[in-house]
Structure formats: structure tokens, C-alpha cells
Image: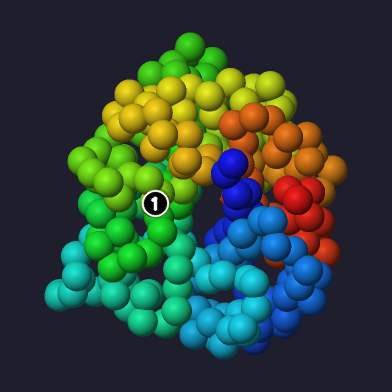
Amino acid sequence: MRKKIVAGNWKMNKTASEAAALIDGIKKEVADVTEVDVVVCPPFTNLQVAAAACAGSNVKLGAQNVHWEASGAYTGEISAAMLKDLGVEYVIIGHSERRQYFGETDETVNARTKAALAVGLIPIVCVGETLAERDAGNMEAVVVRQVKAGLNDLGDDLAKVVIAYEPVWAIGTGRTATPAQAQEVHALIRLTLAEISDGDTANAIRIQYGGSMKPENAKELMSQPDIDGGLIGGAALKADSFAAIVKAGE
Ligand code: 13P
């Protein structure tokens, strides 16, 4: 039985002091939750404050990106070891906004994933098709390519990865994939995982849904057999709505 995982992707929102307040609110609301892994992913500048706020609670800390090199002359970048040292446990990799605006490719997703795993961070690897790709009948090809290339050559570490299926057309649009639409792609992802590993590994890997997930639709989405949690944007910026989604996963 896969344990559900609900993560908040704060994107470029919240100052450090706002982050501490939001985490305090989330901690209170989810204090009794044991059946769902709860993760918050604030901007880099908030990680130190967030680590202190999360300490001793059931709220885990994630980052939103990581560079693939261990160190060196890469102005503006952040290494996996820097994240690990702050108490970060998860890192989002290959979000569609990074693919769309910052030149992220399947190859850089793969390099970042390997760097994260090398220091013991759990990568949350994002995949998902655009509306144009879906309308052109290319959803399957795009998602399968992103899974195979992004997770290429991870060996036994593949089992540690979390995948987030985020159809780009559902992100920030209020237009959620229907539970059936999401389940179809999650099953496809699990089938693809079985192709590149084995049945046990494919069965153990958690696949989150992301894209306009809210308290009102979270339970039905997470009741689907292959939907193992959520990656939440807008609704993760308030303690009550984020906590309600977490509880919908119980
Ligand atoms: P929204 O929940 O705001 O649609 O964002 C989803 C997302 O991109 C999470 O990574």
C-alpha cells in the first residue's frame, strides 16, 4: 500500500516571515495526520526559516529546484548538498514552468534527479503535456518520453523517486483534469515504470496529481487507484485549504 504524499509548491510566493507564519498554521492543522506525508516547498530564500518552523513536526521540507553539479562557478545556482545541509528532504524537478520559461529539458531533469539522489534527497519529478500536445493526440507520447528520459539510468534509486503528473492545461487555470482523465495518465505512467524497472518498483512509486487541486476535488482525485497524492500550487498558500487537501488523502 503506497502512503499518500501531499506537497505544496509555493512557486515564487511568500517572504521568509510569511513562510514561517504559513508553516505554523499548517503544523497546527495537520498535527494529527499520520497516514499522509506532508511536504512544503517554499522558495530557496525561505528554506532556513522553514526548516526551523518544520523542526519536530510532521511537516517535511522540499525545495523547488536543484542544480546538477556538486559545486563550482554556476552563478545563481543551488546544489543538492546545500539543500541537504539545511534539512531539506524533497526537491521538485522539471516543473512545467521551468520547462516552459527556463529551458528545462528531459536531459537536465535527468541530471538534476541524479544529483538529488546522490545526496539522499527525494526528487519529485514533474511530467505532463500541454493542451496543444493533448489536442494533437500526443499526450501519451509526451508523458512516456518525459518519464523514460527524465528517469533514465537511475538503477535501484528509481524506487525512491516521486512523480507528479501535472497536465499543463490544468495548472493555475481552475480547470482540473477529471479523476478519470488523471487516472488514465497515472496508469500509463505506472505501466511505463514497469517497462523501465520491474513490477514491484512500479507498484511502489508514488505518483501525485497536480493542477488546480482543491479541497473540493482532492478526495475524488486521490481515491483513484493510481493517484497517490497531490502537488498543490495556489491552494497550498493558505493553511486551511492546504490542510483540507492533506486530510482528503487520509
Ligand atoms: P495549481 O494548484 O495552482 O494549479 O498549481 C499546480 C502546480 O503547478 C503545482 O506544482
Q: In the figure, is residue 83 to the left or right of 220?
A: left
Q: Which residue is mark 1?
A: 160
Q: In the figure, is residue 95 to the left or right of 31?
A: left
Q: Residue at position x 18%, y 74% from top?
A: 71
Judging depth in this view, the residue of 161 and 164 nearest the camera is 161
The answer to whether residue 67 of the structure is visible from this angle is no
The answer to whether residue 218 of the structure is visible from this angle is yes
Judging depth in this view, the residue of 211 and 31 nearest the camera is 31
The three-letter amino acid code for the residue at tag 1 is Lys
Q: Position of residue 230 (x, y in %)?
A: 63, 47
Crowding around mark 1 (Cα neighbors within 10 Å: few <14, some 14 to 19, many 20+) is: some
Q: Is residue 204 above or below residue 237?
A: above
Q: Residue furthest top?
A: 137
User: What SS does tag 1 mark?
Assistant: helix
Q: Residue furthest left?
A: 72
Q: Position of residue 113 (x, y in %)?
A: 31, 53
Q: Is residue 53 above or below residue 129?
A: below
Q: Residue at position x 32%, y 78% from top?
A: 82
Q: Is residue 168 above or below residue 91?
A: above
Judging depth in this view, the residue of 124 and 106 nearest the camera is 124
Judging depth in this view, the residue of 3 and 125 nearest the camera is 3
Q: In the figure, is residue 141 to the left or right of 40?
A: left
Q: Position of residue 235 (x, y in %)?
A: 73, 55
Q: Position of residue 131 (x, y in %)?
A: 55, 25
Q: Quadrant of the N terminus?
A: top right
